[in-house]
């Protein structure tokens, strides 16, 4: 994140945007990228993960109470936005981060969407997905069920397509990565790959049709997001190393949304250049492999891996690097997972780990 700050400074300096842009860029970095890193770093503190699991479940209960209130407000035709904090005038990173409201109306379908304590609806879907995997680890059955129901409810009322996709996909991927070295899973995976090759044409056609239906469900949103990515990648060529330093106002064809928004990787390339892109991507990849190895022997690492996969999926439709202040429980868990000390022998040979655990239980009985 320090490298990203340096890329921000260089990009603003290259385009001669002035001292005011430098100050705003630094303040924006302090409230987004720096927070993202500091929460992960705080995972090395002596924090019990059970505290985070219970806190998340309590917040899910609060969301279950708030959701009916927002529906009632919608039926009573109360204003969608109630209040906008004057703090935005000082930081100036967008009024949407400082608005308090009841609900939002989807432009395509005119359906009701909720964002609760998030700045926008898909961000609530991101939080719901992360909280789901944290709530799964709560030991108390009552709070675990409350947390799971609340997290799923947040994902549903956000009407976020990424949230609907990420939850089942991450469940399957986490299970598969944790059991990848088991002989049965390897045999089944080989058979699946074999038959997938035989029916590849049908599977590709099915994937194409599913993708088209996924995009057409909210056609205007898909069109705007696609245009934002194309414009960001095209304009990245103007400043490949350091980027433009800041996001630029978008044209009417993208509903005046900022160029470099709604996509983590394209946004990093546009605003921070290849330097900022690599500064965010390399730790992300290294953390993935580290947590994937440790997930065989550590439950904390398993939860951290699930959180990282959720962030990965949402990174193609959201700017996850600016939402650290919202998904901080998951970021702290990632820090805890990176702190775990792996047992490389049991990681490579899970069968030996099962035998060792059985022997340990047998010795305890004796």
Image (cartoon, rainbow, N blue to C red):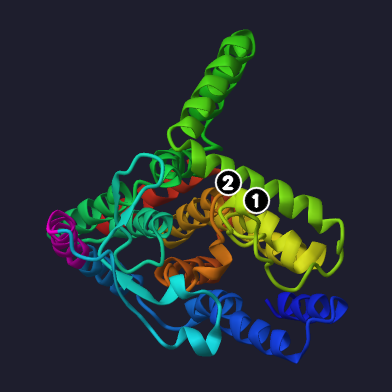
**Residue 192 visible to the viewer:** yes
Q: Secondary structure at mark 1?
A: helix
Q: On residue 118, which mark appears? A: none
Out of 73 and 132, give the one closest to the viewer: 73
Q: Quadrant of the N terminus?
A: bottom right
Which residues, given as a range, are shown in magenta? 61-76
Q: Is residue 165 shown left or right of residue 92?
A: left
At horizontal 54% and vertical 86% (from top left) the residue drawn is 91
Compared with residue 172, is residue 116 higher up or lower down, i.e. above or below? below
**Residue 355 visible to the viewer:** no
Q: Position of residue 130 (x, y in %)?
A: 39, 58
Q: Position of residue 87 (x, y in %)?
A: 44, 88
At horizontal 13% and vertical 54% (from top left) the residue drawn is 75
At horizontal 37% and vertical 74% (from top left) the residue drawn is 99
Q: Position of residue 265 (x, y in %)?
A: 67, 56
Location of mark 1 (residue)? 228
Magenta run includes residue 73: yes
> Which secondary structure class fits the magenta region best?
helix
Q: Secondary structure at mark 2?
A: helix
Q: Quadrant of the C terminus?
A: bottom left
Location of mark 2 (residue)? 224
Q: Is residue 254 shown left or right of residue 119?
A: right
């Amino acid at each position: 994140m320090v490298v990203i700050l340096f890329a921000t400074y260089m990009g603003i300096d290259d385009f001669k945007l002035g001292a005011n842009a430098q100050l705003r860029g630094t303040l924006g970095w302090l409230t987004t990228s720096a927070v993202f890193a500091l929460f992960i770093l705080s995972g090395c503190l002596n924090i019990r993960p059970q505290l985070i699991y219970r806190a998340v479940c309590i917040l899910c209960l609060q969301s279950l109470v708030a959701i009916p209130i927002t529906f009632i407000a919608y039926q009573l035709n109360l204003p969608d936005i109630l209040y906008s904090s004057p703090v935005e005038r000082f930081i100036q990173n967008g009024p949407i981060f400082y608005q308090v409201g009841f609900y939002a109306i989807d432009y395509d379908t005119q359906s009701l969407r909720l964002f609760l304590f998030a700045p926008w609806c898909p961000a609530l879907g991101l939080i719901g997905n992360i909280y789901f995997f944290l709530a799964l680890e709560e030991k108390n059955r009552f709070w675990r069920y409350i947390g799971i129901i609340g997290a799923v409810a947040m994902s549903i009322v956000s009407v976020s397509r990424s949230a609907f996709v990420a939850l089942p996909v991450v469940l399957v991927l986490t299970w598969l990565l944790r059991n990848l070295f088991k002989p049965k899973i390897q045999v089944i995976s080989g058979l699946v790959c074999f038959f997938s090759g035989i029916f590849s044409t049908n599977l590709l056609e099915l994937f194409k049709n599913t993708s088209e239906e996924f995009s057409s469900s909210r056609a205007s949103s898909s069109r705007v997001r696609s245009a934002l990515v194309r414009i960001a990648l095209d304009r990245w060529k103007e400043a490949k190393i350091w980027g433009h330093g800041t996001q630029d106002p978008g044209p009417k064809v993208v509903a005046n949304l900022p160029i470099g928004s709604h996509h983590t990787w394209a946004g990093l390339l546009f605003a921070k250049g290849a330097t900022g892109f690599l500064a965010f991507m390399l730790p992300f990849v290294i953390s993935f492999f580290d947590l994937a190895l440790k997930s065989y022997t550590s439950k904390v690492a398993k939860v951290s891996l699930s959180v990282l996969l959720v962030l990965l999926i949402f990174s193609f439709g959201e700017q996850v690097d600016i939402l650290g202040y919202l998904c901080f429980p998951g970021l702290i868990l990632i820090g805890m997972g990176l702190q775990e000390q792996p047992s490389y022998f049991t990681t490579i040979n899970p069968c030996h780990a099962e035998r060792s655990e059985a022997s340990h239980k047998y010795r305890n009985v004796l």
